[in-house]
Amino acid sequence: MENETAKNAVETAEKEIMIRAEGLVKIYKTKETEVLALQGLDLEVETGELTAMIGNSGSGKSTFLNMIGGLDRPSAGKLWVDGKNLFTMTEKELVRYKRDTVGFVWQNNGRNMLPYLSALENVMMPMHLSGEGKKRVKAMELLEMVGMGHKKNSRMNMLSGGEQQRVAIAIALANSPKLLLADEPTGSVDVGTANYIFEVFSELNKQGQTILIVTHDMALSKKVKRVVAIRDGKISSERILKEQYADRVKEADIDWREEDTQIEYAILDKAHRVQIPQELMGELGLTDNKVKLSVENGAIIISKPD
C-alpha cells in the first residue's frame, strides 16, 4: 500500500511539470563545421506557469523553442513535454503532438495566417472539432477573447500588425493546446499593443494556460513572474518578480524598462558550475582565466588572484 501511495505521489508530481529538459544538446552540422547551439541545457517549467526566456542572438533560445514545438530534434540529452518523450516520438506521434499539445505564436504573422482567409476562417482552419457550427462558435469565442471579434471578416492585409498578432494568438489556441509557445510576440508592435498582448497572456495564464515566451522586450520580460536567461546554450540565471510588483503589472505609471522589478539568481548546473555575467567579470580586471575562491560569512567570494 505504501509503495502504491508513493507511486501515485510521483505520478502527481510528474503531472505538475509541463517541460523538463536535462542535459539538452543540439549540434548543427555542415560539410565544413559544427555549431553547438545547446550545451547541456537543464530547465523545468511547471504546468500553469507563465515563463519568459531571454538571451542574445545565437544563445540557443530559438533552438530550444523549436525543439519544444516539435520542429527540431535534440542531438542528445532528455526532453519531455506534458509527459511525452520527444526523443522517442515517431513522425506520426510528432504530428499529433504538434496538433494537440502545443500552440505556436510567431513574430512573423505570415506563418500564423493564410492571407486569402478571413480572421474567423483562419482561426477555424486548424480545428479538428466535429461540425462546422462548433468550429465557428469556438473561433468566435477566441476572437472575442483577444479583442478581435469585430474584425472576424477581415483578411490579413486589412489588419494592422498588432491586430494580426492578436488573431495569431487565437489561432494558436484553436485546438486548446496544453502549452502555448510565443516567439517574440511583441517584437513588431507598438507599446500599447504590446501591453495589450501581455494582458491577453496574463489572463490566459490565470485560466491555467502554460505559456513560454521568448522575447527581447525588456518591458515585457520585467512583468513576468519568472524569467530564465540563456547564454551559450545553457540556462545562466533566473529572475523572479519581486512581491511588491506582482499585482501592479497593469499600472501605467511604472517604467518597466528602467525599474528594478526582479531579483536575479545565478543557476548552478548538475556539476555545480555557474556562469558569471561578463559585466561582473569585467570589473575584476582579469589578465587570464584564473580566479581565487574563498568563503566569508556564508558567502562565496570570487576575486582576482594576488
Image: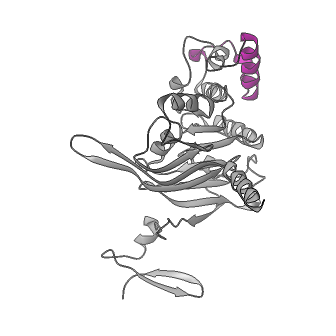
Residue depicted at x 73% and y 46%? 252
In the picture, which quadrant includes the N terminus? bottom right
Q: Residue at x 59, y 64 (%)?
A: 264
* Position of 187 relative to 236 (above/below): above
Please identify the quadrant where the C terminus is shown. Answer: bottom left
| Residue 90: percent from left, percent from top | 48, 33
- Front one among 197 and 51: 51
Residue 86 position within the rendered picture, expressed as x and y whole percent measured from the top left = 51, 41
Foreground residue, 128 or 243? 128
Residue 76 to residue 153: above or below: below
Outermost residue toward the left in this view: 32
Residue at the farthest front position: 1
Q: Is residue 304 left or right of residue 142?
A: left
User: Range of the magenta residues?
Assistant: 131-159
- The residue drawn where x is 57% and y is 82% is 299
Q: How many marks?
A: 0
